[in-house]
Image (cartoon, rainbow, N blue to C red):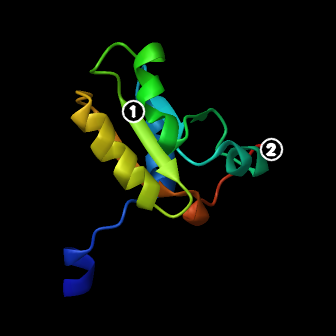
Amino acid sequence: MIFETLFQFPDINQGVKTVAETAGSLLLDVRTRQEYVQGHIPGSQNVPLQSLDNIRLSVQNKDTPLFVYCYSGGRSRQAAQQLRAMGYTNVKNLGGIAAYRGRVER
């Protein structure tokens, strides 16, 4: 029980539902382009972590709800931190697609 309290892991399945319910939100897949084409969550946009600075070109409103995921949660955690450092105020790390139970697009 203590372990669960200390280590709260994002629930990507609940997160994807939240994205669908959040007006104006964007779902960002921060994996590589190769990983993305092998299977991604429908409606997501591929913005690889190493190219994350490019998000400024397409998302000027710093209050836009941004939801990020990767394969296991490590890169999405880094991406969320980087986005916050860039001034985005509404950023949520959903974790990794490895735990996703929904449909994926290829």
Q: Are marks 1 and 2 in contact (CB under 8 Å)?
A: no
Dot 1 or dot 2: first in sequence order is 1
Where residue 36 appears, as percent x and y from the top left, is 69, 45
Q: What amino acid type is highlighted by mark number 1?
A: Leu
Residue occupying the point 27% across, 30% down: 86
> The disc labelled 2 sits on which kind of residue?
Arg
- Find disc 2 in the rendering and name its residue: 106
Q: How crowded is mark 1: few (under 14 residues within 10 Å), some or many (20 or more)?
A: many
Q: Residue 104 carries which label?
A: none
Residue 25 appears anywhere in the view: no
Residue 72, placed above or below residue 5: above
Residue 59 is situated, as x and y percent measured from the top left of the image, at: 42, 17
Circle 2: is it few (<14), some (14-19), or many (20+) Cα within 10 Å?
few
Q: What element carries label 1?
A: strand
Pointer 1 residue: 66
> Number of marks in the image?
2
Residue drawn where x is 80% and y is 44% of the image: 106
**Relative height, residue 56 to residue 15 (above, below):** above
The location of residue 8, given as percent across then percent down, is 28, 68
- Which residue is depicted at the point 47% across and 24% down? 54
Tell me where residue 81 sits by quadrant. top left
Q: What element carries label 2?
A: loop
**Residue 50 higher or lower than 45, as above or below:** below
Q: In this view, does 19 lie to the left or right of 87?
A: right
Q: Which residue is drawn at 52% across and 44% down?
A: 30
Q: Using the rendered view, name the quadrant where residue 63 is placed.
A: top left
